[in-house]
Image (spheres, grey):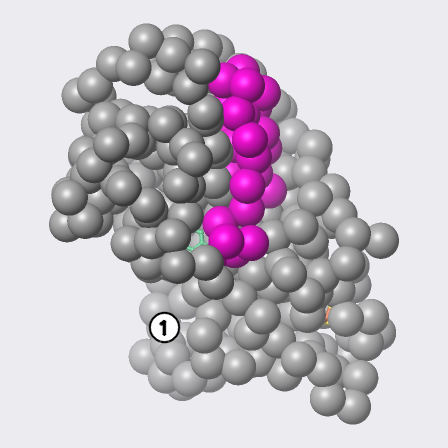
Amino acid sequence: MSKVEIYYFSGTGNSLAVARDIARRLNGKLIPVMSVMDQDLIGKEADVIGMVFPIYDFKPPKLLADFIGKLADIGSKYLFAVSTYGVTPLKAMKKADADVAAQGGKLSAGFNVQMPHNGIGYGDISVDKQKEMFRNWDIKLDVVADYVDARKEGCLETTNVMTGFILSGMLFKALPSIASLLWHVMRHGWASMGFIADEKCSGCGTCVRVCPMQNISMAEQRPCWSDHCVSCFACIQWCPREAIRLGNYRANLFRYRHPEVKLSDMLRENRLGSTK
Ligand SMILES: Cc1cc2nc3c(=O)[nH]c(=O)nc-3n(C[C@H](O)[C@H](O)[C@H](O)COP(=O)(O)O)c2cc1C
Ligand code: SF4
Ligand code: SF4
């Protein structure tokens, strides 16, 4: 019988929820990417490897290429990828495909799943809209599972700017926020957008524990950010006080976490985190 391993990276739970569903359907093992990155060879025992990740700036997270570079005997595996995205992934799957090919493997399938956007600029997403996205995923789960079960090859989903961005209507909704963000950066520079904890911070340390990159430490009861952030927004979105901001940018940050993912689920990604 084939051994299936589903690896995931997630900041706010969308990719974790999707990976969990796929693992359940394919009778596979669910494994956080960050729990294996210190290993020299990953997935030695597996015949089928699934990789589930969010889209950042129309690409997979940079650490996906590092993960792929560590896959054991990559040429012998059936590999597939699933991205979760907020507005449009564009050609992100082509990038994942190229990363796999660079290591001598083949990405047999790549699917994209729209989920609520966890970044800034797109405003809030109504509960009804969120439920619609989750229902769409329930339907697409069958497609993904059947495709992988049959070991089919060749489907690499992409979107283009017209269908993905403009027709979704989200670009127009986001235009005022994007304009305000650009105006802020022009006046104050990107450096002014660093994370800070404001006066609402209670020093609870949740941000430290939830950061998958171990990029946050506490000093005098306040979080300090280091320089290996991957912009997953986990710290912002899991802070129980909504105390984390992007520097002096006064954006009305939309707080979002996948409703069926708990903080304890997320802490499994982080080797420092406890699951209390
Ligand atoms: C810094 C950042 C950049 C993002 N860039 C994109 C993007 O280019 N296209 C897109 O559709 N969604 C983008 N998103 C939205 C996420 O990909 C989406 O919400 C994803 O489902 C989050 O997954 P997670 O909950 O597993 O972290 C971005 C989110 C963040 C935080
Ligand atoms: S999670 Fe929020 S309240 Fe807790 S230490 Fe971090 S910034 Fe402060
Ligand atoms: S510091 Fe960066 S990597 Fe860590 S949780 Fe915050 S956004 Fe994610």
User: Label 1: few (<14), some or many (≥20) within 10 Å?
Assistant: few
On screen, residue 12 versus residue 65, left or right, reads right
Q: Is residue 71 above or below residue 154?
A: below
Q: Position of residue 46 (x, y in %)?
A: 41, 32
Residue 257 magenta-highlighted: no
Q: Is residue 143 visible?
A: no
- Residue drawn at the location 74% of the way across and 42% of the way down: 262
Residue picked out by circle 1: 183
In the picture provided, is 77 more to the left or to the right than 127?
left
Which is nearer the eye, 21 or 117? 21
Q: Residue at x 52, y 25 (%)?
A: 28
Query: SS class of the residue under badge 1?
Result: helix
Q: Give whichever of 175, 261 is nearer the camera.
A: 261
* Nearer to us in this view, 164 or 215: 215
Secondary structure mostly seen in the magenta stretch: helix
The amino acid pointed to by label 1 is Trp
Query: Which residue is found at the position 33% from the left and 58% from the top?
Result: 66
The residue at the point 32 percent across, 79 percent down is: 186
As displayed, is residue 182 above or below residue 35?
below
The N terminus lies in quadrant: top left
The answer to whether residue 179 is visible is yes
Query: Which span of residues is magenta-colored?
Result: 13-37
In-image side of 204 versus 90 (left or right)? right
Name the residue at the bottom extreme.
220
Q: Is mark 1 within 8 Å of ligand 1?
A: no
